[in-house]
Amino acid sequence: VSGLPEEEVEAAAQLDVSFATLYSSLLSALARADPPPDGRSLAEPPSPLPFVGLPLPQPHPAASLAAEQRTAASAKEVYRLGAAHAARAKGFLVLDGFVTDHCAILNLETSLLAGLLPFEAHPGRKMAIHKRRADLLAVPLAQLNEDAYVQLYRQALRQGKAYSQLQV
C-alpha cells in the first residue's frame, strides 16, 4: 500500500470495509440455521461482480468452508478474516480525519464480535466478547465533540446494549 496515491489507498481501505462486511454477514448467516432466501448454499459464491478490468480479490476459501461446517472453529476463522480486513481499513481510515468511516468500522467490528456469540458456550468468554464490544465503541465517544457528531452519539445506544448484555 505504501507508495500508492492517497485515493488508491482509500479505495483499498473501502474494499477492506466491504470484505469485513461480507464476513460479518456470513457470521450472522452461520448463526441462523435457515438457508439463504435465494436457495443457494452459503458455500456457493454469489454471481460474479460485473466489473470489467477491475481485479477484485475473491473471498477467502475459509469462508466457503465455514458455510459448510457451521462450527465454532469455522466461525472464529470467519471472524479473524473479517477482523483483519477491518483492522487494515482502520489503519488508513483513522479517527482523526475519517470520523464517520472510522466509527462505521468500529460498529462493524462489534458486529463481527457479536457474530461469535452464538458459537460461544463458555459464559466467561461471552462476557469478554461483550466487554470488548463495549470498549470498542467507547473509544470515539471519549474523543469526539458531542455537538458536532450528534448521530454518532445516538449510535452510542448500541454501546449501552453491549454493556447491558454484560449483566446477562
Image (cartoon, helix red, strand yellow):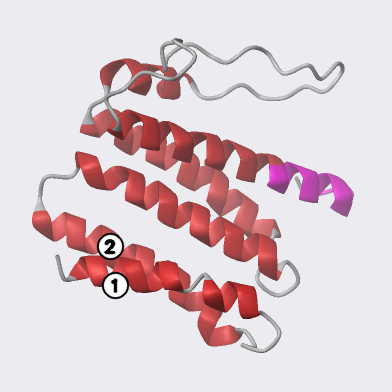
Per the image, the residue denoted by label 1 is 163
Above or below, comparing residue 78 to residue 93 in the picture: above
Per the image, the residue denoted by label 2 is 130
Residue 105 visible at all: yes
How many C-alpha atoms fall within 10 Å of the one at disc 1: few (<14), some, or many (≥20)? some
Residue numbers of the magenta segment: 2-14
Q: Quadrant of the C terminus?
A: bottom left
On the rendered structure, is 72 left or right of 143?
left
Residue at x 16% of width, y 71% of height: 167
Closer to the camera, 36 or 87? 36
Residue 118 placement (x, y as % from top left):
23, 42
- Three-letter residue code for mark 2: His
The circle on residue 110 is: none
On the rendered structure, is 72 left or right of 85?
left
Residue 116 lies in the magenta stretch: no
Distance between the alpha carbons at the discs numbered 2 and 1: 7 Å
Residue 4 visible at all: no
Labels 2 and 1: the sequence-earlier one: 2
Q: Report which quarter residue 77 is drawn in.
A: top left
Element type where label 1 sits in the image: helix
